[in-house]
Image (cartoon, rainbow, N blue to C red):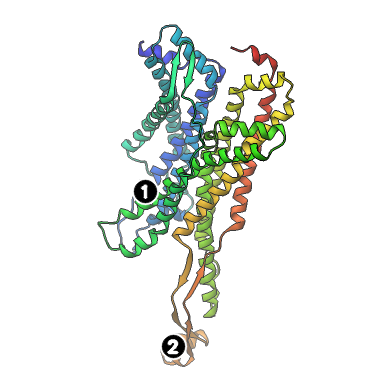
Amino acid sequence: MRPTTLVRLALAGTRTDTARVVLTALSALLATLAGLAALTVLAIPTPLATEENRNRWSEQYNNALLVEPGLRGGTAFALLMLMVPVLALAGQCARLGAPARDRRLAALRLAGATPGQVTRLVVLETGVAALLGTLAGLGVYLVGRDLLHRPDARGQLALPTDVLPSTGAMVGVVLGLPVVAALATVLMLRTVTTSPLGVSRKAARERGPGPWAGLLIGFGVVSFAVIRSVVYRFDDSEELAWLVPLLFAVGALAAMIGVVIGTGWISYHCGRLLRRHARRAPALLAAGRLMADPWAGSRTFAALLAALIFGGGAAAQRAYFATKDQLEREQSRLVGVDAGANPFYLSTMDLVDGAVAVAILIATGGLIVALVEGIVARRRAYAALVATGVPRATLSRSVAWQALAPAVPAILLALTVGTLLGRGLIAEVSTGGSSTPICEATAALCDDPATREQYTRIVHTPGIQRAVPVPLEHLAWLGAGALAAVLVTIGVGLLFLRASTALDELRTA
């Protein structure tokens, strides 16, 4: 089969196939923007130290996250974290219209295509859609860079529109994301066999998922807990400078994978509990679905859970900064000085919370796509149930049970793990004791060295150690937002359920 024929077949299909290509391209566009934004932050040059600028700050910006070199790594990491829900959304979009695509692939096999050609066709379809999205994302990035380059009255910029990542880094993002998408498609197709009679997959395991995902979560939490000890012990060791970022990255990844995989275990056991204790048809139908495909929860909630883990860690960091600011103001009042609140770190956390909100919003889109795809894929089964007399209201409640039963404990687990990761880094705030001279006289007497000493007293402030409180209110808001996202998803999915339970679906090949 010629390459041009492969490309033409990859872009052919029904309106559902077109929607899948468009949504995949849109996901790639968003991921490209997040990746290029992170690279732009890292590309900001650090000036040489001078008498006027000993801290080597980039003073051409008015945002402290860009001015201070030590804060740019965290800013870039937060931007990269936005790619996680976007890539998960792309994975959900790739499954859209899977039954119709399976029939189309079987028709190609019937027309003489080999299994390898059919596999390459699916991979090319995903890769081309992702490439279109990354090229569009590059265009949006370059155009937006020119439009947003607006220095203020002092000549400072709100965004780093005066720098560009290296050409190699930009090419790596634009071409690397389609390659990753294509490789992920190959991985997902490893258990798929396409024949002229249809598309078959390996049977799912009969046993439920094991609880070994807890080991990954435990490893991630322990990795974060030992980071402080490693910093104190090897702070001056250049040979082991790589150990802290390695523990941070590996621990976060292990905890995230553990929570996502653990959702499969949660789904299976929620199904078992429903089957054992439920007495009504909706819950029993949901129990059967949860036990038959427990990994559906892991696939569906992956992006949302990743965003919640990040949000839980950010909530723990906010609690640390708030406690530290309160402690510093208390010590200032002991010496008779009202220092006021320091808004820098808390305002920085506002930006992080905004990134978490955007990630949850993107994850909600992935939830909607996943739920609608599942309803459409099982429309013949739903239509058969309606034909045998099952009310559509029963099916609607069954879909709601199937989504909510694993979602609630999975949300609680993600927030708990995220909070434990954040508290593993900082669980307490401590300040050392100090002695501060206070002059209790007029400014003239305090400025005169001859009279200053007789009006000066030494105020001793003791060292204080205070535990960082658990940010229950912030976590409650995050959990409520995630639960609202799931409820919105269920509401949108139920709109498609009525059309998918029409009796005409029984005649669909």
* SS type, badge 2: loop
Total marks drawn? 2
The quadrant of the picture occupied by the C terminus is top right
The three-letter code of the residue at mark 2 reads: Asp
Image quadrant in which the N terminus is located: top left
Percent across and percent down for residue 428 are: 48, 66
User: Which residue bears the numbered disc 2?
Assistant: 448
The image quarter in which residue 400 lies: top right
Amino acid at pointer 1: Ile
**Residue 337 falls left or right of residue 60:** right
Residue 154, position as x, y percentages in the image: 46, 54
Quadrant of the image occupied by residue 500: top right
Residue placed at 66% from the left, 25% from the top? 496
Q: How far across and down, in percent of the image, does residue 71 sit?
A: 41, 55
What is the residue that sits farthest to the top in this orientation? 111
| Residue 399 against residue 60 in the figure, above or below | above
- Given residues 211 and 164, the one toward you in this image is 211
Q: Position of residue 175 (x, y in %)?
A: 36, 30
Q: Residues within 10 Å of mark 1 (few under 14, many from 20)?
A: some
Q: From this viewpoint, is residue 190 visible?
A: yes
| Image position of 4 with respect to 382: above or below | above
As measured in the structure, the alpha-carbon distance from the residue carrying label 1 to the one carrying label 2 is 47 Å
Instruction: Identify the residue position indicated by label 1 in the image.
Output: 44
